[in-house]
Amino acid sequence: MHVMNGIARVMGMSLLVATVAACGPSTEGQTKDWERNKEKAGELRVDFPNFKVALDSEQKKAETIWAEAGKLSDEEAKAAKMKAANEEFGHLVRRLGEVKSRTADLKKKIGKLAGMSIPKSKSGKRKKALEKARLSISEVTAEVGKLQPADGASARKALGPHVSRLLRANSNMDKTIKGMNPKKRKKKKSKK
């Protein structure tokens, strides 16, 4: 019986070690992330041509780290270095992607709110919410379009307030849409 408990403990520990090891970065996973970052950066260079210099700068820094990873023979160390390269490059890619996705989300919500059947009493509230959301998109698009960051750090810093504004605008639209939906009335049980 004691032998079985010992075997069970060893198997349990082996499983735990294997699980923890599997959670770390792998070279295969990091390579996929790298390719995804490069693909997204290419799309973002088209969507935000004024960020090309910053994206190029971040990619160049990340490529240096990536090349260093290629020289390592230890798989764990290589994967960790590859992860560092992806993080270096991914910060700006994610931030610009967030501007793009938050804007798209807000446009969908504008369409949803505009197409809702609502009582006449709520039409003024809807009109005001739509105007505010459209203004947020217009101003963020214009302001982000004027930015000319030279590197990733200045780009991320400059984008922060715009992402925050889009987040607030999305949240406000969610609240407005929820407020436009007629509340379902609960049927009261009649007492007999």
Image: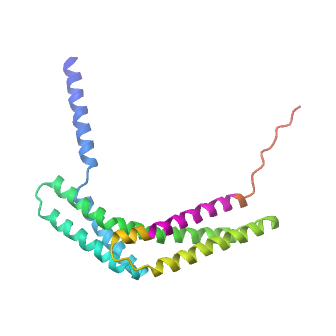
The quadrant in which residue 181 appears is bottom right
The type of colouring in the image is rainbow
Q: Taken as a whole, is the magenta stretch helix, strand or loop?
A: helix
The quadrant in which residue 124 appears is bottom right
User: Considering depth in this image, is 90 or 109 the residue closer to the camera?
Assistant: 90
Residue 160: % across, % down? 46, 66
User: Considering depth in this image, is 29 or 192 the residue closer to the camera?
Assistant: 29
Looking at the rendered image, the quarter that the C terminus falls into is: top right
- Residue positioned 78% across, 65% down in the render: 122
Residue 54: % across, % down? 34, 76
Is 28 left, or right, of 128 in this rendering? left
Is 64 left, or right, of 131 in this rendering? left
Residue 153: % across, % down? 35, 68
The quadrant in which residue 92 appears is bottom left
| Residue at far right of view | 192
Residue 39: % across, % down? 33, 73
User: Considering depth in this image, is 20 or 164 the residue closer to the camera?
Assistant: 164
Q: Which residues are magenta?
A: 159-178
Within the magenta stretch, is there residue 111?
no
Against 51, residue 165 (above or below) is: above
- Residue positioned 62% across, 75% down in the render: 134
Is 65 left, or right, of 113 in this rendering? left
- Residue positioned 22% across, 22% down in the render: 4
Against 1, residue 11 (above or below) is: below
- Residue positioned 33% across, 79% down in the render: 53
Within the magenta stretch, is there residue 162?
yes
